Image (spheres, rainbow, N blue to C red):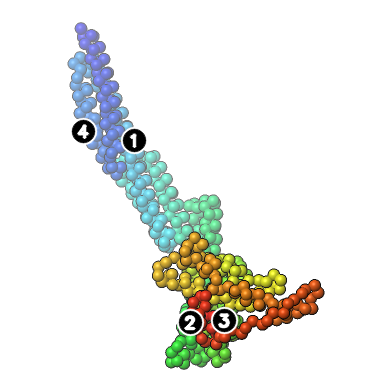
C-alpha cells in the first residue's frame, strides 16, 4: 500500500511540476519583457512574491515519505533554475539599460564635441567615470560580464566622441584639425579607413569654403551692381523728367562724386549727361537700334548676341543711336525680362515677332532688298504689342492671348497686321522707282540686258506735315516726318 501511494504521489507531483515549471517560466518572461531595464529588484520580487509561494505549495502536496522527497528535489531544482535564469536575464536587462543610457550620453557628448572640439578631454573623462560607476553600482552586472560590458561601452562611446570632435575641428580649420586627429594620441579611436574619410572631409570642407567665398563675392558684386543700376535709373529719370527743376538737379560733377555708382556707371552717366546737349537720335536709327537691343535681350542663354546688362543700351544712347523714349522702352523691357515670368513672356514675344516680321518687313526677291519702311513698321508693331501686354497685365488678362492664334485678340492675323503692311500699289511704285535707279544699289534697269521697262509716273507726294495727326487703317496716328507713332 505504501509503495502504491508513493508511486501515485510521485507521478502526480511530476505532472504538477511540469505544469508549474511551464507556468513560472511564462510569468517570468512576461514580467521581464514589461519591466524597467533600470530596475534591479525585478528578479528578487519575482522570486519572493511568485516563485517561493508556488514552490511551497508544490512541496506540501505529497503525504508519503517517498513523495515528499521527490517533491522537495523538484522544488530545489526549480529554485536553482530560476535563480540562474532570473540572474542571467537581469544581467542582460541591465546591459540593455546600460547601453541605452550610455548611447544617450554619447550622443549628447558627441554633439558637444562637434560644436566645441576643445571639450573632448572632459567628455572622454566623463564617459569613463559614468560607465564605471554605472556598471559597479548595478547588482546585476558582476564579474566577467560587468568587466566586458564596461570595456565595450567605454571604447565605443569614446571612439564616437573622438570622431565627432575630429569632424568639428576639421570644419573649423581643415588643415589644423586633420593634423591633430591624425596623430598618435587618437590612433586607438580612429582606424586607417576612418582617417582616409577624415582626409576626404577636410578636402570637401576646403572646397566648400572656396565655393562659399566665391559665391559671397559674386553676391556682393551683384548687390553692388544692382545698387548702381538702381541709382543710374534714378539719374536717368530725373534727367528725362518733364520737371525742369529735376533735370537741373543732375550734373556731371554730382555723378562723378556719387560712389553708389560703379566706376563704369559714373563714366557712362557723365557721357549721357553730355549727350543731352546734342540733337536727339533720328527716329529710324533709334527704332532699329531699340528693336535689335530687345532682340538681343531676349536671346537664349549661350547665344553670342545675348546681352545681360544695360551697358550696351546706355552705350547706344550715348552714341546717339537711341532716343529718350526708346531708351525708356528698352530699359523697361530689360527690367521685365529679369523676372521668371518676364523671361518666359519675353521669349514668347521674340518668337512671335520673328513669325510676323516677314509679313510686315517684306523682301523683294528681284531686287534683293528690304522695304525701306519695313523696319519702322516692325518697330511700330513691337511697341504696340508691348503696350497691349502692359494693358492686359493692368486689367488682369493673360497677355499670352495676344500671341495665341486660337484667341480672338490674336495680333498676328491678317486684320491685325493690315495697319503695319505697305499696300500693294505702294510696293509696286517703290519697285518701279528702284528699277529706274532709285537707290536699290543695282544699275538702272535700262542698262540691264534683256530687261524691258516701262516708264511710270512718279507717285504723288503725300500731303502730310510732321507733327500732325491723320486717319490711318490703324486709327488716329501722328506723322513724325519719317514714320507713324501713336499720338
Q: Nearer the viewer, residue 206 or 384?
A: 384
The answer to which of marks 3 and 1 sits earlier in the sequence is: 1
- Picture coordinates of residue 426, whole percent (x, y): 62, 76
- Picture coordinates of residue 278, whole percent (x, y): 57, 91
Cα distance in 3D space between marks 4 and 1: 19 Å
Question: CB under 8 Å between callouts 4 and 1?
Answer: no
Q: Secondary structure at mark 4?
A: helix
Task: Please state if 96 lies on the left or on the right of 300 as rendered.
Answer: left
Quadrant assignment, res 285: bottom right
Cα distance in 3D space between marks 3 and 1: 103 Å
User: Residue at point 40% right, 70% down?
Assistant: 395
- Picture coordinates of residue 136, whole percent (x, y): 33, 46
Question: CB under 8 Å between callouts 3 and 1?
Answer: no
User: From the viewer's perspective, is residue 210 above or below residue 1?
Assistant: below
In this rendering, does residue 232 appear at all? no
Q: Secondary structure at mark 1?
A: helix
Q: Nearer the viewer, residue 286 or 1?
A: 286
User: Residue at point 25% right, 12% down?
Assistant: 7
The answer to which of marks 2 and 4 sits earlier in the sequence is: 4
Question: In the rendered image, which residue does mark 4 sit on?
Answer: 49
Q: Quadrant of the N terminus?
A: top left
Task: Please state if 132 lies on the left or on the right of 310 as rendered.
Answer: left
Question: In the rendered image, which residue does mark 3 sit on?
Answer: 483
Cα distance in 3D space between marks 2 and 3: 12 Å
Q: Secondary structure at mark 2?
A: loop
Q: Nearer the viewer, residue 16 or 371?
A: 371
Mark 2 against mark 4, which lies toward the viewer?
2
Question: In the rendered image, which residue does mark 1 sit on?
Answer: 88
Amino acid at each position: 500500500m505504501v509503495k502504491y501511494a508513493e508511486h501515485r504521489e510521485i507521478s502526480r507531483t511530476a505532472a504538477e511540476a511540469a505544469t508549474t515549471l511551464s507556468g513560472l517560466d511564462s510569468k517570468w518572461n512576461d514580467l521581464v519583457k514589461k519591466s524597467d531595464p533600470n530596475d534591479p529588484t525585478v528578479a528578487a520580487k519575482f522570486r519572493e512574491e511568485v516563485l517561493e509561494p508556488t514552490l511551497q505549495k508544490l512541496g506540501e502536496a505529497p503525504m508519503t515519505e517517498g513523495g515528499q522527497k521527490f517533491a522537495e528535489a523538484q522544488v530545489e531544482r526549480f529554485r536553482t533554475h530560476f535563480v540562474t535564469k532570473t540572474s542571467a536575464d537581469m544581467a542582460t536587462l541591465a546591459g540593455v539599460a546600460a547601453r541605452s543610457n550610455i548611447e544617450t550620453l554619447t550622443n549628447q557628448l558627441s554633439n558637444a564635441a562637434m560644436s566645441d572640439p576643445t571639450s573632448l578631454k572632459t567628455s572622454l573623462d566623463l564617459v569613463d567615470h559614468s560607465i564605471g560607476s554605472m556598471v559597479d553600482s548595478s547588482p546585476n552586472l558582476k564579474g566577467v560580464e560587468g568587466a566586458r560590458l564596461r570595456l565595450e561601452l567605454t571604447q565605443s562611446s569614446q571612439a564616437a566622441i573622438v570622431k565627432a570632435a575630429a569632424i568639428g575641428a576639421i570644419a573649423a580649420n581643415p588643415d589644423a584639425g586633420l593634423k591633430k586627429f591624425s596623430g598618435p594620441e587618437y590612433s586607438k579611436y580612429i582606424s586607417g579607413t576612418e582617417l582616409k574619410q577624415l582626409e576626404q572631409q577636410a578636402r570637401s570642407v576646403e572646397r566648400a569654403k572656396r565655393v562659399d567665398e566665391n559665391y559671397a563675392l559674386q553676391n556682393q558684386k551683384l548687390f553692388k551692381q544692382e545698387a548702381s543700376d538702381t541709382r543710374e535709373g534714378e539719374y536717368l529719370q530725373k534727367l528725362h523728367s518733364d520737371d525742369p527743376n529735376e533735370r537741373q538737379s543732375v550734373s556731371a560733377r554730382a555723378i562723378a562724386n556719387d560712389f553708389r555708382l560703379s566706376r563704369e556707371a559714373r563714366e557712362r552717366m557723365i557721357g549721357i549727361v553730355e549727350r543731352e546737349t546734342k540733337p536727339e537720335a533720328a527716329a529710324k536709327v533709334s527704332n532699329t537700334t531699340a528693336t535689335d537691343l530687345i532682340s538681343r535681350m531676349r536671346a537664349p542663354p549661350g547665344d553670342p548676341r545675348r546681352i545681360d546688362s544695360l551697358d550696351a543700351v546706355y552705350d547706344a544712347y550715348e552714341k546717339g543711336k537711341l532716343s529718350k523714349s526708346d531708351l525708356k522702352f528698352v530699359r523697361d523691357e530689360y527690367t521685365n525680362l529679369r523676372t521668371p515670368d518676364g523671361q518666359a513672356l519675353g521669349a514668347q514675344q521674340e518668337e512671335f515677332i520673328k513669325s510676323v516680321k516677314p509679313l510686315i518687313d517684306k523682301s523683294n526677291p528681284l531686287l534683293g532688298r528690304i522695304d525701306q519702311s519695313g523696319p519702322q513698321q516692325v518697330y511700330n508693331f513691337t511697341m504696340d504689342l508691348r503696350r497691349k501686354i502692359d494693358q492686359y497685365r493692368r486689367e488682369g488678362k493673360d497677355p499670352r492671348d495676344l500671341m495665341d492664334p486660337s484667341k480672338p485678340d490674336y495680333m498676328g492675323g491678317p486684320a491685325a497686321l493690315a495697319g503695319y503692311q505697305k499696300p500693294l500699289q505702294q510696293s509696286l511704285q517703290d519697285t518701279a522707282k528702284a528699277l529706274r535707279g532709285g537707290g536699290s544699289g543695282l544699275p538702272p534697269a535700262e542698262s540691264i540686258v534683256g530687261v524691258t521697262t516701262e516708264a511710270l509716273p512718279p507717285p504723288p507726294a503725300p500731303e502730310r506735315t510732321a507733327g500732325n495727326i491723320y486717319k490711318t487703317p490703324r486709327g488716329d496716328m501722328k506723322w513724325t516726318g519719317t514714320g507713324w507713332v501713336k499720338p
